[in-house]
Amino acid sequence: MSYSILVVDDSPLIRKMMKRSLGLSKLELGTIFEATNGKEALAVLENEWVDVVLADIHMPVMSGTELIELMSRDEIMGKIPVVVVSAERSEPAIAHLKKLGICAHLMKPFTPEQVLETVTRVLAEAAARSHT
């Protein structure tokens, strides 16, 4: 089974680093979609199957928080695991995102190993949930 991943970040460099990190993994990867903000991410999610979303919080047009709030209200999108990839350190902000159902918070700057470990764990947890 191959996994499709959506990387949402306004920084082309961060998107490139995430894609490169995922490419180094032993995961069978399908398509790695990219979006520069939450609005673009929603368009991808409405048209493509995505197994996990890696999203920044602070982006123009639509923030990651707004994206996660909208996803959490949707019956299908609300089941897609979300990993927040951000330099955000505010406890209240992270607590709010956890209430919305994020699976993990990966701090910037990150290493390829951290990306791989987090994505692998989140996908394994999602697979375990779908079999119960």
Image: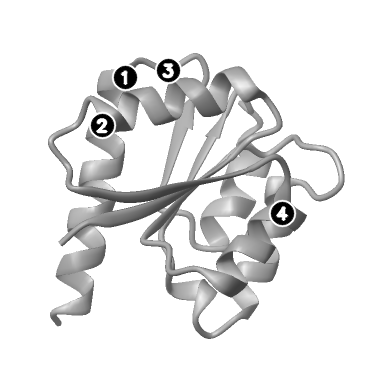
Q: Nearer the viewer, mark 4 or mark 2?
A: 4
Question: Can you say whether 40 is above or below 8 in the image?
Answer: below
Question: Can you say whether 101 is above or below 111 in the image?
Answer: below
Q: Which mark is residue 112?
A: 1
Which of marks 3 and 2 precedes in the sequence? 3
Which amino acid does the dot numbered 2 rest on? Answer: Leu
Which of marks 2 and 4 precedes in the sequence? 4
Which amino acid does the dot numbered 3 rest on? Answer: Phe
Considering the numbered disc 4 on the image, is that residue within a helix, a strand or a loop? helix
Which quarter of the rendering shows the N terminus?
A: bottom left
Disc 3 to disc 4, how far (Cα)? Answer: 24 Å
Residue 130: percent from left, percent from top:
22, 77
Q: Which mark is residue 110?
A: 3
The answer to whether residue 115 is seen in the rendering is no
Which of marks 4 and 3 precedes in the sequence? 4
Residue under numbered circle 4: 40
Considering the numbered disc 3 on the image, is that residue within a helix, a strand or a loop? loop
Total residue callouts: 4
- In the shown orientation, is residue 127 left or right of residue 91? left
Which amino acid does the dot numbered 4 rest on? Answer: Glu
Residue 19: percent from left, percent from top:
41, 30
Outermost residue toward the front? 31
Q: Are marks 2 and 1 in contact (CB under 8 Å)?
A: yes
Considering the numbered disc 1 on the image, is that residue within a helix, a strand or a loop? helix
Residue under numbered circle 2: 116
The answer to whether residue 43 is seen in the rendering is yes
**Quarter assignment of residue 72:** bottom right
